[in-house]
Amino acid sequence: MMPDLGAYAVEVTLAWLGSLALLGGLIAWVWLRGRRVRAELDQIENRSERKRHG
């Protein structure tokens, strides 16, 4: 149910959409960075295991 925003409907809607877009971008950035960091940590762990057992 949408409240009656009157003359400010466009501005409020754009503000909501902008906020959601920024939040979505932040979530995507954190998720992608986490994947990259996890991959780097796996490489470091594999290198240290090879040196220890190698």
Image (cartoon, rainbow, N blue to C red):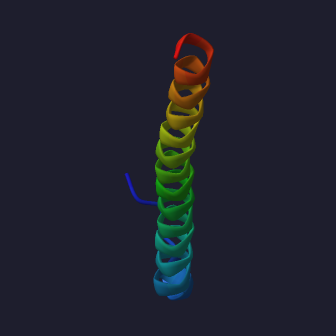
Horizontal arrangement in the rendering, residue 4 relative to residue 26 (left or right) = left
From this viewpoint, which residue is outermost toward the top? 53
Q: Going by the picture, which residue comes out furthest to the front?
A: 54
| Above-or-below relation of 38 to 54 | below
The furthest residue to the left: 1
Q: Is residue 16 above or below residue 40?
A: below
- Residue 19 position, x and y percent, is 57, 67
Residue displayed at 55% across by 59% down? 23
Residue 37 placed where, x, y %? Answer: 57, 43
Q: Nearer the viewer, residue 7 or 44?
A: 44
Q: How many marks?
A: 0
Which of these two is toward me, 44 or 54? 54
Foreground: 20 or 36?
Answer: 36
Where is 50 relative to 4, above or below? Answer: above
User: Relative to 15, is 28 above or below?
Assistant: above
Q: Residue at 47%, 51% (x, y): give it.
A: 32
Instruction: Write the residue at 59% across / 34% down.
Output: 44
Q: Quadrant of residue 12?
A: bottom right
Residue 34 on image: x %, y % = 54, 43
Residue sitting at x 62%, y 15%: 52
Residue 36, position in %: x, y?
50, 48
